[in-house]
Image: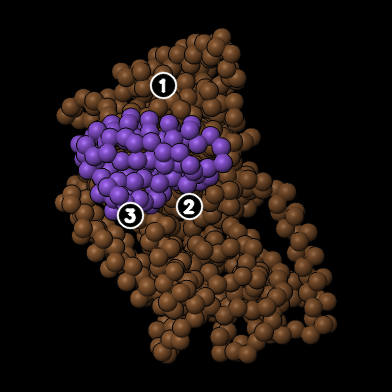
C-alpha cells in the first residue's frame, strides 16, 4: 500500500495504466518498429494538437492583431482537417507501411508538385499554407510521442509521474477511473480538472513509479489517500463497501450543486455563469456545469464576416445556444461594437477617443437597422429557450427606455405576424460606466437584471485605457476606488432585490473573488475555461471571513494594501483547507 | 446526380477566402457528395486543398455537381446562389 494526498475524492478499482512522462520517452530512444495502429494514432493526435495550437493562435491574432489576419488561420484550420490531406497520409501509413512523419512529408511534397502547375500566381502561392500546416503537424509528431492518453480504450486507473495541463485537458471521464501521480499538488491545473470531472485523484505519492513496476490492478481510496496494488478478493470486498459509501456521499453533494450552483464553506449559495463567444465552447460548458450563459458576446458570432450578418444567421446561432442551455437563462448581449471592435461592413465614425465615443448601445441607437435586425433574431429565436436581452454600455436611463420601447413593439409585431414569440422577454443592463454604476437604484424599476462589466468599469473609473501600456499599472480592478464603485452599485439594488451579477476578468480573479463575495456578490459570470477554478475557490471561502476582508479592502488607501490583505486571506484559507483534508483522511483511516 | 455550369464572376476567383466559405458551406451538407469541375479536372468541394488545386480564376467557367438521395435540385440551387451572392460579395 502507498499513500498520497487526496486532490479529488472518490473510490475506484481497476486495471492500471502507466502514462509515461515525457522525459522518460526522450531517454528511451529505442529504434522504432513499424506499428500501423500506433502511427495512425500518433498522426491523429498530432493533428489534434496542431488544431488546438491553431485555435489558440487564431484567438490571439484576433484579439491582438485583427480580423483580417485571423483569416489566414481560418484557412489553415480548414486545411488541417482537409479530407484529401488526411486521407492521403492515412492511406500511405496503411497501404505503404510508412511512418506517420514520412507519409506526411511525402503527401505535402506531392501536393506542392500539383500546386506548381496552377497558372494563377496568387492561387499557386497558397501552398505555403499547406506547408505551414504540414510543419505544424510534424512538430506534434516529434514532440508528443509519449503522450498515450489517446490510446486508452477501456477505463483504467492512470498512473504517472506528473499530469501536464495539456494532458489534463484531454482527460475523459469515461476512460479514467482514477488518477494517481507521484508529483503535483492539490491546486495544480490537473487536480482542478480532475475535481471538475469528478475523477478521484491522489497526488504526491512518493516512490510511486519505482514501487509499482509490475503492478496490474489497484484500488484507489480517494477518501483516505491510500492505494492498494494487486488487491486480493478480501480487499475487493472492502473496496465495494468503500465505493457504495463514497457514492452516497457524492450523491449527497450532487444534490446540492446542480449546474452552476455551488456553496461556500459555510453554506452560502453562489451561482456560476459562463461567458460565451463561440458555439464551440458549449461542450466544455456542459462538462464544467454553469447556471446559464451570463454574457453571450454576440459580436464574436460574426467576427469573421466581411459582409453584414443576416437575421437567419443570428437566429440559427441563438437557437443552438438556447436549446443547449434550456431551461437555464442565456443573456444575449446586444452587439457591443465601436472602440476596439470594428467591422469592415459597418461605417464606424472616426473619433479621437473611441472609448468615449459611439460604442455599445450608443452605436446601435445610431444604427437602428442593425439593432432591429438583431432584436428580431433574438425575439424569433427566443421561443427555443430562456432568452434574455442584455444592453451594453448604458449611461442614461433613456437609452434603456428606448430599447424597451423597441423590443415591446417588435414583440407585438411578431405576434401579429403569427410567429411563436414569448412576449415580455426579460431585459437587463450592463453596468460598465460610472454613470450607470451610481444610478442602479434608479435604473432598477425599469429592468429585470443587472450585470457589471468590470473590464470597462475599471477603465472608466480609473481613467486608464486597458490597451495602453503606459497606464497598465493604473488599470487594476483591486483599486479601492473601483471596489467602492462596485459597492455603491451593489447597494443600489439591495431594496429591489433584483438579480445582480458580475462579469469581466475580475469575476474570475482568485484575488478578487473573496472580496466580491464579502461585498455581497453571489453571481459570477466567467470564461468557460475558468469555471472549475472559480468553483474550486468559492467552495473554500467562508462568507463571514470574506466580509471582514471586504470591509478592510474598502477602507484601504491603495492597491498595495488591498493586495496584502487578500494575500493573507488566501494563505490562511489554503492552510485551513489543507488541515481539513488531512483531518478527514485521518478520520477515515480510523474507521 | 445533377450538375450545372456557372461562371465565376468575381475578380479573384476561388481564392483562399471564397474557397473557405464554400468548404464550410459544403461541410454543412454532409448527406451530399458535392464536386466542382473545371478545365477537365474534378475535385471534392469539402476540401480546401482540392478547390484551390482546381485553380479557378475570376471569369472562369466551372461545373457544380450534387449527388444525394433527395432534394438534389434544391441543394444545387442553394449552392449556386450561395456562390453567386455570399461568396461573390466577399470575392
Name the residue: 38% across, 40% down: B64
- Residue at label 1? A373
- Residue at label 3? B49
In-front residue for pair A464/A162: A162
Alpha carbon separation for disc pair 1 and 3: 36 Å
Alpha carbon separation for disc pair 2 and 1: 31 Å
Q: Label 2: chain?
A: A
Q: Is residue A586 visible?
A: no
Chain shown brown: that is A
Residue A529: assigned label: 2
Name the residue: 82% across, 82% down: A233
Q: Residues within 10 Å of mark 1 (few under 14, many from 20)?
A: some
Q: Give the secondary structure at mark 2.
A: helix
Q: Label 3: chain?
A: B
In-front residue for pair A427/A466: A427
Q: The N terminus of chain A appears in which quarter of the rendering?
A: bottom right
Name the residue: 63% across, 53% down: A265
Chain shown purple: that is B
Amino acid at each position: 500500500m502507498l499513500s498520497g494526498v487526496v486532490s479529488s475524492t472518490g473510490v475506484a478499482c481497476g486495471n492500471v495504466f502507466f502514462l509515461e512522462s515525457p522525459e522518460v520517452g526522450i531517454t528511451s530512444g529505442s529504434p522504432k518498429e513499424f506499428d500501423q495502429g500506433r502511427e495512425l494514432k500518433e498522426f491523429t493526435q498530432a493533428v489534434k494538437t496542431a488544431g488546438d495550437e491553431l485555435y489558440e493562435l487564431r484567438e490571439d491574432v484576433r484579439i491582438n492583431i485583427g480580423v483580417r489576419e485571423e483569416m489566414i488561420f481560418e484557412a489553415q484550420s480548414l486545411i488541417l482537417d482537409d479530407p484529401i490531406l488526411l486521407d492521403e497520409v492515412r492511406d500511405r501509413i496503411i497501404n505503404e507501411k510508412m511512418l506517420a512523419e514520412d507519409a506526411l512529408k511525402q503527401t505535402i511534397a506531392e501536393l506542392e508538385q500539383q500546386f506548381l502547375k496552377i497558372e494563377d500566381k496568387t492561387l499557386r502561392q497558397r501552398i505555403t499554407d499547406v506547408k505551414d500546416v504540414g510543419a505544424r503537424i510534424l512538430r506534434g509528431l516529434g514532440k508528443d510521442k509519449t503522450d498515450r492518453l489517446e490510446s486508452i480504450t477501456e477505463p483504467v486507473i492512470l498512473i504517472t509521474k506528473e499530469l501536464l495541463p495539456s494532458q489534463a485537458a484531454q482527460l475523459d471521464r469515461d476512460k479514467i477511473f482514477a488518477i494517481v501521480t507521484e508529483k503535483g499538488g492539490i491546486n495544480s491545473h490537473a487536480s482542478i480538472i480532475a475535481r471538475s470531472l469528478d475523477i478521484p485523484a491522489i497526488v504526491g505519492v512518493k516512490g510511486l513509479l519505482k514501487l509499482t513496476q509490475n503492478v496490474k490492478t489497484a484500488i484507489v481510496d480517494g477518501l483516505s489517500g491510500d492505494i492498494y496494488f494487486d488487491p486480493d478478493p478480501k480487499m475487493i470486498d472492502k473496496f465495494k463497501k468503500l465505493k457504495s459509501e463514497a457514492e452516497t456521499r457524492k450523491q449527497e453533494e450532487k444534490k446540492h450543486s446542480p449546474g452552476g450552483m455551488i456553496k461556500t464553506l459555510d453554506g452560502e449559495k453562489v451561482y456560476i455563469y459562463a461567458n460565451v463567444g463561440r458555439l464551440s465552447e458549449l461542450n466544455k460548458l456542459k462538462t464544467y456545469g454553469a447556471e446559464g450563459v451570463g454574457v453571450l458576446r454576440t459580436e464574436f458570432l460574426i467576427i469573421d464576416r466581411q459582409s453584414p450578418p443576416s437575421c437567419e444567421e443570428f437566429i440559427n446561432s441563438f437557437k443552438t445556444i438556447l436549446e443547449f442551455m434550456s431551461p437555464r437563462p442565456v443573456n444575449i448581449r446586444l452587439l457591443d461594437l465601436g472602440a476596439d471592435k470594428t467591422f469592415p461592413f459597418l461605417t464606424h465614425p472616426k473619433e479621437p477617443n473611441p472609448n468615449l465615443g459611439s460604442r455599445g448601445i450608443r452605436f446601435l441607437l445610431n444604427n437602428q437597422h442593425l439593432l432591429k435586425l438583431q432584436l428580431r433574431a433574438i425575439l424569433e429565436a427566443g421561443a427555443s429557450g430562456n432568452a434574455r436581452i442584455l444592453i451594453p454600455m448604458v449611461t442614461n436611463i433613456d437609452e434603456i427606455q428606448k430599447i424597451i420601447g423597441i423590443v415591446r413593439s417588435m414583440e407585438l409585431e411578431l405576434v401579429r405576424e403569427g410567429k411563436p414569440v414569448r412576449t415580455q422577454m426579460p431585459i437587463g443592463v450592463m453596468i460598465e460606466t460610472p454613470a450607470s454604476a451610481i444610478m442602479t437604484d434608479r435604473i432598477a424599476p425599469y429592468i429585470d437584471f443587472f450585470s457589471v462589466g468590470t473590464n470597462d468599469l475599471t477603465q472608466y473609473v480609473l481613467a486608464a485605457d486597458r490597451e495602453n501600456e503606459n497606464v497598465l499599472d493604473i488599470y487594476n480592478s483591486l483599486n479601492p476606488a473601483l471596489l467602492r464603485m462596485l459597492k455603491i452599485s451593489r447597494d443600489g439594488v439591495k431594496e429591489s432585490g433584483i438579480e445582480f451579477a458580475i462579469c469581466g476578468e475580475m469575476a474570475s480573479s482568485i484575488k478578487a473573488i473573496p472580496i466580491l463575495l464579502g461585498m455581497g456578490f453571489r453571481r459570477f459570470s466567467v470564461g468557460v475555461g475558468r469555471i472549475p477554478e472559480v468553483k474550486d475557490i468559492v467552495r473554500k471561502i467562508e462568507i463571514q471571513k470574506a466580509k471582514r476582508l471586504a470591509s478592510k479592502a474598502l477602507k484601504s488607501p491603495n492597491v498595495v494594501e488591498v493586495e496584502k490583505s487578500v494575500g493573507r486571506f488566501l494563505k490562511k484559507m489554503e492552510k485551513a483547507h489543507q488541515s481539513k483534508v488531512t483531518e478527514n483522511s485521518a478520520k477515515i483511516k480510523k474507521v | 446526380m445533377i450538375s450545372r455550369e456557372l461562371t465565376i464572376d468575381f475578380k479573384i476567383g476561388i481564392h483562399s477566402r471564397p474557397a473557405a466559405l464554400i468548404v464550410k458551406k459544403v461541410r454543412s451538407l454532409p448527406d451530399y457528395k458535392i464536386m466542382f469541375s473545371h478545365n477537365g479536372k474534378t475535385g471534392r468541394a469539402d476540401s480546401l486543398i482540392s478547390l484551390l488545386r482546381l485553380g479557378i480564376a475570376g471569369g472562369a467557367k466551372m461545373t457544380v455537381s450534387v449527388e444525394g438521395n433527395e432534394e438534389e435540385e434544391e441543394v444545387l440551387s442553394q449552392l449556386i446562389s450561395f456562390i453567386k451572392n455570399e461568396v461573390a460579395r466577399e470575392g
